[in-house]
């Protein structure tokens, strides 16, 4: 009996001396583990005469229970101490300034795209879309670009390698092919805009290989150039948030319109800041015209029954003008500092009622 009591005291002393949880666990293993001291004693029971076995077994179990109780108490004590230490050490100083999180934002191009859609949606225009990868028919032929016409080269087209039939797909150079796709798929009248990405092999301060356009198309029996002018002037007035809009139409050439024009808006540049409405300068905004009869024919529409007007404008350029971005290439440099400066909140969608920007 004395031998067990000594062992019990010895182990209890070790438990008390254990300074941390891992030291305590080492004591537990050395006492109660498979080859531990108390487990070793239990193994000797088998060699005892049966009459001694019961009382000796009970005595060893009592030691085991006593040690287990002390062990658990010490464990709880050490865990509490460990927690207290962590709470002390890991205290958060709420008076410190919070770490700055990288800030996302709506890109000015997308903001302007949404503004344009909001303005035209209010005027009753539908939004149409087409693929970025186009074929020659939709991007050129159906839009009345003659075969081998230099305008095809002027568009600095990105062509894909020819497929097994020798057909070269291309990245659309403008959003005008969406006109073709919509007219082929539906029945007139049409009143739509088509926003999207376009691609040209060109890069400098005012050109990037990828940029954005919005196409507009109205086809109806009596659609005429006066309506085109009203639609575009109304758009400009809403977009630049000014009532005084003066425009001029300069004759131009596009294969898909006849007559064709470029539209300029009267403006001034004061200290580098653009003001639309008054002034001595003219700002070129878009290309437009009356849809060429050949384009209507290519889409299965009778030009003697229907006519219409169309326009195309550069979205990134409008964003630069409205929000004062100096270099187009920065728009696509994927620089979060730039976006933090020029970006818009994702929680305020532009709409004509509560304001566009
Ligand atoms: N597609 C022309 C371009 O990218 C822009 C354009 C001009 C579109 C006149 C039109 C239009 O629909 O009528 O330069």
Image (cartoon, helix red, strand yellow):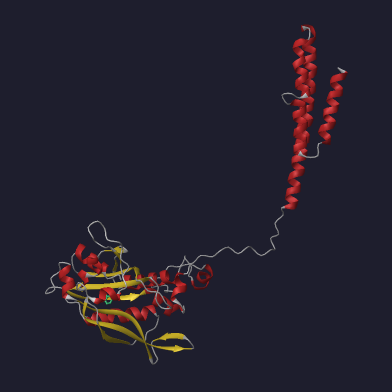
Q: Quadrant of ligand 1?
A: bottom left
Residue 20 seen in render: yes
Quarter of the image with the C terminus in it: bottom left
Asked if 52 appears above or below 157 in the picture, the reply is: above
- Direction from residue 17 to residue 327 in the image, left or right: left
- Direction from residue 230 to residue 36 in the image, left or right: right
Residue 207 rendering spot, x and y as whole percentages: 39, 76
Front residue of 342/133: it is 133
Question: At 28% across and 81% down in the image, what residue appears?
Answer: 230
Asked if 195 appears above or below 288 in the picture, the reply is: above
The image quadrant of residue 69 is top right
Question: At 75% across and 51% down in the image, what residue appears?
Answer: 88
- Direction from residue 28 to residue 352 in the image, left or right: left
The image quadrant of residue 27 is top right
Asked if 243 appears above or below 71 in the picture, the reply is: below
Q: Residue furthest bottom?
A: 280
Question: At 25% across and 70% down in the image, what residue appears?
Answer: 191
Asked if 262 appears above or below 83 in the picture, the reply is: below
Residue 247 rendering spot, x and y as whole percentages: 32, 86
Quarter of the image with the N terminus in it: top right
Q: Residue furthest left?
A: 304
Residue 130 seen in render: no
Question: At 86% across and 22% down in the image, what residue appears?
Answer: 5
Q: How many marks?
A: 0
Front residue of 254/61: it is 254
């Amino acid at each position: 009996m004395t031998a067990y009591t000594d062992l019990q005291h010895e182990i209890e002393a070790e438990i008390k001396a254990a300074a941390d949880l891992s030291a305590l666990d080492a004591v537990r293993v050395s006492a109660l583990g498979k080859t531990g001291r108390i487990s070793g004693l239990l193994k000797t029971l088998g060699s005892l005469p049966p009459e001694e076995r019961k009382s000796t077994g009970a005595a060893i179990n009592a030691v085991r229970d006593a040690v287990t109780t002390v062990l658990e108490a010490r464990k709880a004590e050490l865990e509490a101490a460990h927690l207290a230490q962590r709470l002390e050490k890991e205290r958060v100083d709420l008076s410190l300034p919070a770490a700055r999180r990288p800030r996302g934002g709506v890109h000015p191009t997308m903001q302007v795209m949404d503004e344009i859609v909001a303005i035209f949606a209010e005027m009753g225009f539908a939004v149409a879309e087409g693929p970025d990868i186009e074929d020659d028919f939709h991007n050129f032929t159906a839009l009345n670009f003659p075969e081998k016409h230099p305008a095809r080269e002027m568009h600095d087209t990105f062509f894909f390698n020819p497929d097994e039939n020798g057909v070269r797909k291309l990245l659309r150079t403008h959003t005008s092919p969406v006109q073709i796709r919509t007219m082929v798929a539906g029945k007139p009248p049409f009143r739509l805009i088509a926003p999207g990405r376009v691609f040209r092999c060109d890069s400098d301060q005012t050109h990037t290989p990828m940029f954005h356009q919005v196409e507009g198309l109205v086809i109806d029996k009596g659609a005429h150039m006066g309506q085109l002018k009203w639609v575009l002037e109304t758009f400009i007035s809403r977009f630049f948030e000014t009532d005084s809009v003066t425009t001029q139409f300069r004759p131009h050439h596009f294969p898909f319109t006849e007559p064709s024009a470029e539209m300029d808006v009267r403006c001034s540049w004061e200290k580098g800041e653009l003001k639309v409405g008054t002034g001595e300068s003219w700002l070129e905004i878009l290309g437009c015209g009356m849809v060429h009869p050949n384009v209507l024919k290519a889409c299965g529409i009778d030009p003697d029954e229907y006519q219409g007007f169309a326009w195309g404008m550069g979205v990134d350029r409008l964003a630069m003008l409205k929000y004062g971005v100096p270099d187009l290439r920065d728009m696509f440099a994927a620089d979060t500092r730039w976006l933090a400066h020029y970006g818009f909140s994702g929680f305020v969608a532009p709409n004509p009622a509560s304001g566009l920007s």
